[in-house]
Amino acid sequence: MDRLLLRTRAAAWLAFFVLCLGSWAMLYVMARDMGVGPLGFPRMSMDGDMAMGGTDMTRLLPLFGMWAIMMAAMMLPTFVPTARVFMDLIEAEIARPVGLWGLATGYVWVWLGVAWILAGAQVLFVRLGLTGVMGQSLSLWFSAALLLAAGAYQFTALKEFCAERCRSPMGMFLQRFAPGLRGGIRLGLRQGIYCAGCCWGLMAIGFAGGTMSLLWMGLATLLMVLEKLPEIGRWLTVPIGLGLLGLGTWVGWLALTA
């Protein structure tokens, strides 16, 4: 059992780091090939035209592929605290290693669903003229609304409910535990929903600065990871909310005076 546990732990962390690094590498290549700068805006070619690459970013399926890779890059790091807690159950011989793979599978399924929703939203925003094809906002009012909505959500009971279950998943694991792969998948689905409820605001503000902005993705990932850490996460929710509200108010003022 000890040998199996060690092998499972090593394989799980190896797969985790490979997926994380691979996802970020793919995003960098995609941004480069589409001619997108670090801030998420298309670069200008020598003749003054915007370099967009050969990908049609107004269609749902290509956008879903892009968002799926973004979910892997941004949300896999936030899975670390959850995986560590489940490994404690394996060490206590309450759960089996196969349950960990089920947990990860359910978690990934939820974020693939989120990727589909965000891809659909981006198609709608492009058609309405609110964002460009790279997902960057074309309206200061739209940017302000996103920032203010995300900031206000930080102070809601739903945000606190979901965030606490992301920081301390052990209670839910013990209450809802079922052995085997299927049991792990059900736990992963539930935990993924909590995670989506906790993080959707920080994901949505990507439309304010460009969904292909590596700078935004890196900052959002860092904030989401820190916010889920039990030791410091609960102290960051309010400052993040105040920061988003302040930024949204400033952008709204720019829109009003433009």
Image (cartoon, grey):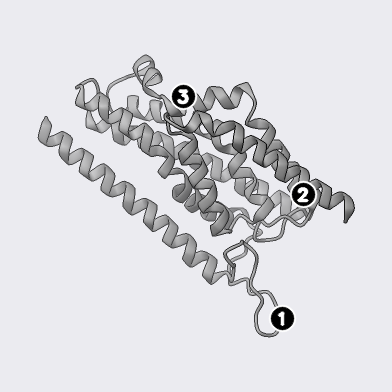
Residue under numbered circle 2: 251
Q: Amino acid at mark 1?
A: Gly
Residue 117 appears anywhere in the view: no
Q: Residues within 10 Å of mark 3 (few under 14, many from 20)?
A: some
Mark earlier in primary sequence (2, 3): 3
**Which labelled disc corresponds to residue 165?**
3
User: Looking at the picture, does residue 248 appear above or below residue 123?
Assistant: above
* C-alpha distance separating marks 3 and 1: 50 Å
Q: Amino acid at mark 3?
A: Arg
Residue at 32% in and 50% down: 17
- Judging from the image, what secondary structure is the residue with disc 2 in? helix
Q: Residue furthest bottom?
A: 47
Number of numbered markers: 3
Mark earlier in primary sequence (3, 1): 1
- Judging from the image, what secondary structure is the residue with disc 3 in? helix
Foreground tag (2 vs 3): 2
Q: Amino acid at mark 2?
A: Val
Query: Is 178 situated left or right of 136 in this image?
Result: left
Residue 12, x across and y down, in percent? 27, 42
**In the picture, residue 160 is in which quadrant?**
top right
**Which labelled disc corresponds to residue 48?**
1
Image quarter of the N terminus: top left
